[in-house]
Amino acid sequence: MPVQQFAPMTKDFPTFDCDAHVTEPAWIWERAKDWLTKEELEALKTTMWFDAETKQLIVNGHAGAGLGSQRIGGTAGLVNVLTSAGPGLKHDIQRALNVRNLDPTTALTKDQANYIDHKGSYEPTARLRDMDVQGIDQVMIIPTDIDTYPWLQNAVGAKAMCKAYNEWAYDYCQADPNRLFFAAMLPMQDPGFATQELYRVAAKGCRVALVRPIDAMGNYPIQPKYEPLWTAMEETGVVYGMHPFPAFGTLKPPGYTEQYSGAELISRTVYSSGLPHFFLTNVQNFQAEAALWVTLTLMSGFFDKHPKIRAAVFEASSTWLSFLLDECDKMYKLYRNERQMPRLKRLPSETFFEHCVTGFEGDEAPPSRLPEFYGNILAWSSDVYHHDGDDAWRALETMRKCELPESYQTKFLGQNARTMYRIETPKKFIRDRVTEIERPDWWPTEEEVQRSLEPEAGIVRRYGEGVRANGHAVNGHAVNGHDREGARA
């Protein structure tokens, strides 16, 4: 069997992954009756329900909704972007497997697709094994279908779905409560329901409650009707988790079709321009949503009004933050005498530094070059098991290349997150990197990986078109070593 090898590495501190994902499995709905009242269960069935017979998520009466979190076990010819980034499955290897799938003669079989469908995204024991390899000592799990929740039209059904998910996530974390922690979903469709659910999950030890930057039915969370929820966050100490998402908005009900989040405007620009790949929107949409939320909360005096709230900005990188806070400070100084709102008590940057942390990913180098700015506000996230996820060792490699002192590595990779969440530092943690993983015979070789990284390797053309493959001219005969007659048009 081939062996995938990694350079030896060690670390002398425990890591905390502040933003990694689970995929909501079908058995959340199968077990819903154990967690919900009769009224809640009936509302859930008509609001957001996984139909076991057709294997479709039905939302607000629309079949096939959501991002496909429930597709588990692998699908022939497909790399599941929601569950692929497990131990050692680096981005280059994913690329090689995706290139294979362009040709039916080399596409992944069902068994092969199942192998890279990482079970840790829905089974905790498997996740703990993966974490040992990935150098992740503790993790905060976040759902994948978070974009679907805001458009649930029945408030009771939304309450039921959040409760069902939160109970499953809590149960998942009981496999090792010292390593696994869950971020709760809140039914923002009804502020009263959201407040009730916050108190309920806080009693279970939940540390984070998730609220999207533009949430239920297009509401921005700083609207006055949510004041009871923010008061409850101050009382419980639960962290306000602001998590953006691509915001496809495909489930919008009538009356909201012309209301867009920042990410949706970016998506519409990409689609109307004729660009073929929706992932191109990810270059900006997460950052756009986060930047809007940061600006709104800081400039509106949200944290002056709720001085005990702590907030975490998830999955938006962090390099943009230094520029944005500088702009907020500049606008505050320039227009503070013209404000029609109550004067802010301090500079927006000072408010952010006191109340917030921001996530960053392991291949993001700029924060490591500005440790004085990011010192107490940076918290690493793997984004595992989503396709762009990576492990703690990658983050360490980036930081060490930037010659970041270990004292900052310790803070960025765990200490800042644990301080925010009020979680104790574990006494036992992973020190040494696993340097070898046995792989099946079909695993991509280094030569195949390098070939797949060439731009032409990922381009499918009609038969007969001139194309270059692996640096050589090809005239309609073979691409990547395979007969073009068998490739997909």
Image: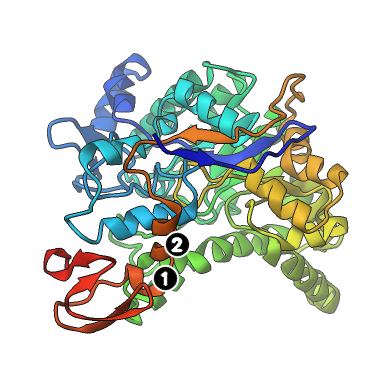
What residue lies at 28% left-to-right and 56% top-to-bottom?
A: 100
What residue lies at 40% left-to-right and 64% top-to-bottom?
A: 451
- Where is residue 27, by image quadrant? top left
Task: Identify the disc placed on residue 24.
Answer: none
Task: Identify the disc placed on residue 454.
Answer: 1
Mark 1, secondary structure of its residue: loop
What residue lies at 84% left-to-right and 51% top-to-bottom?
A: 375
The answer to whether one can see residue 139 in this image is yes
Q: Amino acid at mark 1?
A: Glu
Q: Amino acid at mark 2?
A: Gln
Q: Which residue is mark 2?
A: 450
Please tell me how crowded label 1 is: few (under 14), some (14-19), or many (20+) other residues with Cα within 10 Å: some
- Residue 481 drawn at (x, y percent): 26, 65
Please tell me how crowded label 2 is: few (under 14), some (14-19), or many (20+) other residues with Cα within 10 Å: some
The answer to whether one can see residue 184 in this image is no
Q: Is residue 163 left or right of residue 361?
A: left
Q: Is residue 1 left or right of residue 48?
A: right
